[in-house]
Image (tube, rainbow, N blue to C red):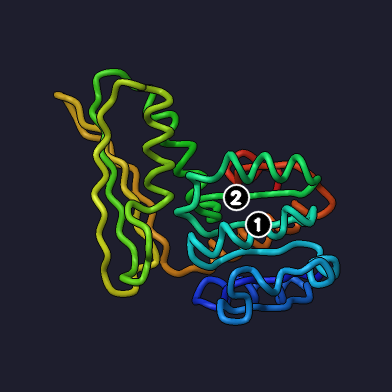
């Protein structure tokens, strides 16, 4: 496959490395080269199989819109843009493109999502979430923490779920779900040692998305990888 990675930050650079290790050809665009999605033209997009976005919330919206308007396929690892998710879904379906998005592409985090769903079914518990990321992470709470909250509220709509966000150094990501009752405390914790697990999941997502049309969230398809 020929992949186009948009974003030369730490995660985007690692995605590029992993994709090449898995035998793919990769082109890369940084934010300056693609200001306002200006480089995502019809001739450019037509040459690649899947675009992967690892930029900023504002840039991601521009990049998603440009790709989907051309009927292209895009994997989005950027978070903080979901207030326009419905618009992007409609555009993908209208133009015959493909959108695969997720708050976290780590396979371990996907298991955390599953276990949280089971934990949230227990009656008599109060839930809390804490997350720690590197200082340069733009959104707080993290998209992963918000997904965990969404999973809990799906099982217990009346629950009050507090999220505590911390930004420290170069932390790759720590997420903890706590369930406390009068009798005991249950804790689920996932810690990323580096960004490679995220990058591997994103590349596998792009491989899965090839030749598809439609819209998916990564946690709905990761078991098919």
Task: Decide if residue 1 is in sight here.
Answer: no
Circle 2 sits on which residue?
A: 101
For mark 2, give the secondary structure. Answer: strand
- Give the quarter of the image for residue 76: bottom right
Task: Using a 10 Å C-alpha cutoff, classify the residue at mark 1 as few (fewer than 14 neighbours), some (14 to 19) or many (20 or more).
Answer: many
At 55% from the left and 52% from the top, the residue drawn is 107
- Return the mark for residue 29: none
Whole-percent x, y for residue 134 in the image: 34, 69
In the displayed structure, would residue 181 be above or below residue 149?
above
Task: Decide if residue 174 is in sight here.
Answer: yes
Whole-percent x, y for residue 136 in the image: 35, 71
At 69% from the left and 60% from the top, the residue drawn is 66
Asked if labels 2 and 1 touch by Cβ distance under 8 angstroms, the answer is yes
Task: Name the residue nearer the viewer: 122 or 170.
Answer: 170
Judge left or right: residue 146 versus residue 4.
left
Circle 1 sits on which residue?
A: 75
Judge left or right: residue 175 versus residue 3.
left
Task: Using a 10 Å C-alpha cutoff, classify the residue at mark 2 as few (fewer than 14 neighbours), some (14 to 19) or many (20 or more).
Answer: many
- Give the quarter of the image for residue 205: bottom right
At 59% from the left and 75% from the top, the residue drawn is 35
Most extreme residue toward the left, as rendered? 182
Judge left or right: residue 201 versus residue 146.
right
Q: Earlier in the sequence, mark 1 or mark 2?
A: 1
Judge left or right: residue 193 versus residue 82.
left
């Amino acid at each position: 496959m020929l992949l186009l990675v948009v974003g030369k930050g730490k995660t985007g650079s690692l995605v590029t490395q992993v994709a090449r290790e898995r035998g793919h050809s990769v082109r890369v665009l940084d934010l300056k080269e693609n200001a306002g999605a200006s480089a995502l033209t019809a001739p450019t997009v037509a040459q690649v199989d899947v675009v992967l976005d690892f930029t900023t919330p504002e840039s991601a919206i521009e990049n998603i819109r440009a790709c989907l308007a051309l009927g292209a396929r895009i994997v989005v690892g950027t978070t903080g843009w979901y207030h326009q998710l419905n618009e992007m879904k409609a555009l993908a379906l209208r133009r015959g493109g493909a959108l695969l998005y997720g708050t976290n592409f780590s396979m371990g985090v996907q298991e955390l999502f599953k276990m949280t769903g089971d934990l949230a079914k227990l009656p008599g518990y109060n839930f809390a979430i804490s997350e720690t990321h590197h200082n340069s992470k733009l959104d707080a709470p993290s998209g992963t923490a918000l997904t965990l909250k969404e999973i809990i509220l799906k099982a217990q709509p009346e629950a009050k779920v507090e999220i505590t966000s911390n930004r420290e150094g170069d932390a790759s990501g720590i997420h903890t779900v706590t369930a406390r009752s009068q009798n005991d405390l249950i804790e689920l914790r996932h810690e990323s040692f580096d960004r490679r697990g995220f990058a591997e999941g994103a590349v596998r997502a792009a491989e899965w998305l090839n030749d598809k049309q439609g819209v998916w969230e990564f946690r709905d398809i990761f078991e098919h990888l």
